[in-house]
Every structure is written in structure tokens, then in C-alpha cells.
Amino acid sequence: LMADKDFLRVDGSFGEGGGQILRTSISLSTLLGRPVEVTNIRRNRKFPGMMPQHLTAVKACQQICSATVEGAEINSERLAFTPGQIRGGKYTFDVAESKKSAGAATLVLQTIILPLLFAKSESNIIIRGGTHVPWSPPATYLKQVFLPVIGLMGCQTFLKINRWGWYPEGGGEIACRVRPIDRLRARQFNRRGELRKIYGMSVTSNVGGGGGERQMRAAVKQLRANNLDAQMRNSDVAANGKGTIIFLTAEFDNVRAGFSTIG
């Protein structure tokens, strides 16, 4: 833990003034044991303050380290967060707990995954909410790209999509296992290297009419027009509402990249 226990003050209106400032602040606060005060939370957004997804991220960090928190409520533009000791274990978080929402479960996971990597024991996490929604990385991105890439740094994580959740109904669920590590292995990702392969999926829920098949054919046609081949599959998944996505994973020599469009 850092010796300086004074609050680090962060202006949430800096730059784009969005929720990532809050999430990064409390994630690093939890990891480093440094109290943080975030003001002007999401000041540059149409509806400032914490929405359900942001509040869930705060409560998740609070729970994994028994933090003392002030201002943890919907629409709050100020948060004071004093962390305690990080603990691994079994955790369940629901973005819609405080208010019906399809807020991104993936962003909640990204907030807590770094500190949980340095807990003393393994963690098993369930997060309910939107799994494939606008303005956030879809769960497929975490599974296919983000987690494999941090795996190159020594992280052992495993993600499963238990149920898909689209906007605006939400109701999806992801499960993640995080094994503790002693340190991160530094990597440089400044060169992608040669493209090895592209593969992807066309996924639909409650759409019908062969929409998923048409999506897949259109993607393959676009790629072939650019002299690229891809292994594609089409599937229909259970969900509370309607939704579609095309997701492509590109594997290079040194790294992966993910591309998606939500319908």
C-alpha cells in the first residue's frame, strides 16, 4: 500500500469527460490502496453523473476491497473512495439492481479485473447486464481479444457468456474466473506483424427472416472484395430482446484485433 493516504483528486470532466475516468480511477485506487475523490463525474455527457453501469462498477470495487464510499448513488457527480484490502472470492453484480438498465457488464468487469489479478486467491465473478450494447466493448471482444492479449502478459482469465443481453432490455450474463498473479510481464505491442487469419460470427436473437445468414454473407462479400478470406459462422442465441451483431477477429503474429457492428 502507498504511504500517502491523502485523497488523490480527479476531475471527471477532463478530456472527453466520460465514465472511463471514473472506472480507471477506482480501479487503480483499489489496486494501489490510494483513496481517490472524483468530481464532475460524466460532466460532458448528455445526462451527467453516475448511471447504473457506473454505480455497479463502484459497488463492485467497494465489495472486493471493503472500501468506504461517499456519493455512490444514481446521478451523483462526486465520489469519495477509500479502499481496503483486495480479496478474491465469489462475486455477483447486477447492473440493473438499482434501476432497470442494459448498462455494459463488460465495463464493470474491466474495472475490477486488474485489482483482482493481484488478490491472494482466485476470483469467480458473475456480472449481469448488457453484454453486446452500444458504446462499450462487447463480451465477445473481451473473450476473443482483450483477455487473450493480457494473457500474453501472464494473466490467467477465463470468460463465458452465459446469456446474451442487448439494448435496451439487457438481462445478459457473463462469468469470469481470475487467477492471481505476482506480477505483469511487460510487453510491447507496437507491431502487429503479419495477418495470420480472420474469423468471425454473425449472431442474432429473436430476429427471424434469415437476418443472421444475410449478415454473414454480406460480411464475407465485403472481405473478399478486399482480398481477405474469413471463416464465419452464423448462430441464433437466447436473449430477452432483439439484437444482432457481426464480430470479426483478426489474428496477427504479435496481437489480435476485434471489429464489430451491432444491429
Image (tube, rainbow, N blue to C red):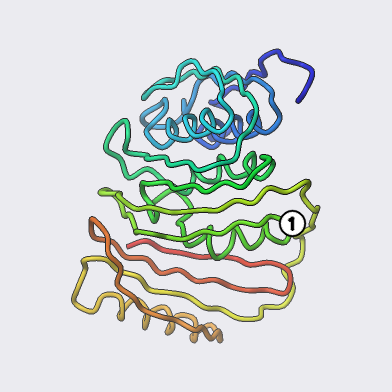
Q: Name the residue under label 1.
A: 153
Say above or below: 154 vs 53: below
Q: The C terminus is located in which quarter?
A: bottom left
The x and y percentages for residue 117 are 66, 45
Is residue 112 found left or right of 108 in the rendered image? right
Write down the quadrant of residue 32 in the picture.
top right
x 34%, y 59%: residue: 164
**The quarter of the displayed image where residue 13 is located:** top right
The residue depicted at 66 percent of the width and 15 percent of the height is 7
Going by the numbered disc 1, the residue's amino acid type is Met
- Residue 135 percent coordinates (x, y): 43, 48
Badge 1: how crowded within 10 Å, few (<14), some, or many (20+)?
some
Q: Which residue is drawn at 46% across and 57% down?
A: 139
Q: In this view, does 149 lie above or below 10?
A: below
Asked whether 259 or 173 is in front, the reply is 173
If the image is split into quadrants, where does the N terminus sit? Answer: top right
Q: In this view, does 49 lie to the left or right of 29?
A: left
- Residue 231 lies left or right of residue 99; in this view the side is right
The tally of labels here is: 1
- Furthest-top residue in view? 6
Vertical side of 143 occupied by 185: above or below: above
